[in-house]
Amino acid sequence: MKSIITTLLVLFLSTSLLEAAAFSKDAKHRSTRVHMSTDKPLTTGKNVFLLTLSKNGKALDAKSVTVKAFMPAMPGMPAMSSKSVAKKLGNGKYEVRLNIAMSGTWQIHIFITPKSGKKSRIKTSINF
């Protein structure tokens, strides 16, 4: 009986840990793709996102990348936002730190300024 309870407890804890997986999402606009990921599950407060940019299947090294996360105003609650310039890691990879003030659905806008050409904006959202 004791071994059955131990086995059930281990299975329960294992499935709980699997649900707390890191975040990963893809977004695109025309031929530009962004893969967003985190090492840890999303949480309120500071989150570190790794962005991988590509254009036509090749790594995209931009002049600058800025990310804005925002939640529009709702009855009884003001609008919230967090904006940060991404740190270039090389080979199309960028790291950005955003402060997510509360759980819920946040709109994400990724502004990419290429070394030459037109600035683009990729829209997506996160929900936790």
Image (cartoon, helix red, strand yellow):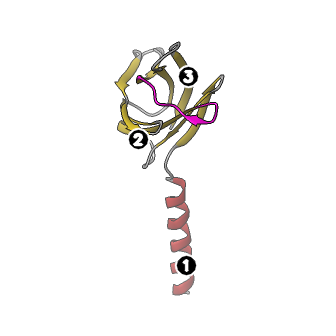
Circle 1 residue: 7
Marks 3 and 2, how far apart at CA: 23 Å
Q: Nearer the viewer, residue 117 or 70?
A: 117
The residue carrying pointer 3 sits among few (fewer than 14), some (14 to 19) or many (20 or more) residues within 10 Å by Cα, namely some
Numbered circle sitting on residue 43 = 2
Does the rendering let one see residue 100?
A: no
Q: Is residue 46 above or below residue 113?
A: below
The amino acid at mark 1 is Thr
Q: Secondary structure at mark 2?
A: loop
Mark nearer the viewer, 3 or 2: 3
Q: Secondary structure at mark 1?
A: helix
The residue carrying pointer 1 sits among few (fewer than 14), some (14 to 19) or many (20 or more) residues within 10 Å by Cα, namely few
Q: Is residue 1 magenta?
A: no
Marks 1 and 3, how far apart at CA: 46 Å
Mark nearer the viewer, 1 or 3: 3
Query: Magenta residues?
Result: 55-63
Circle 3 residue: 122
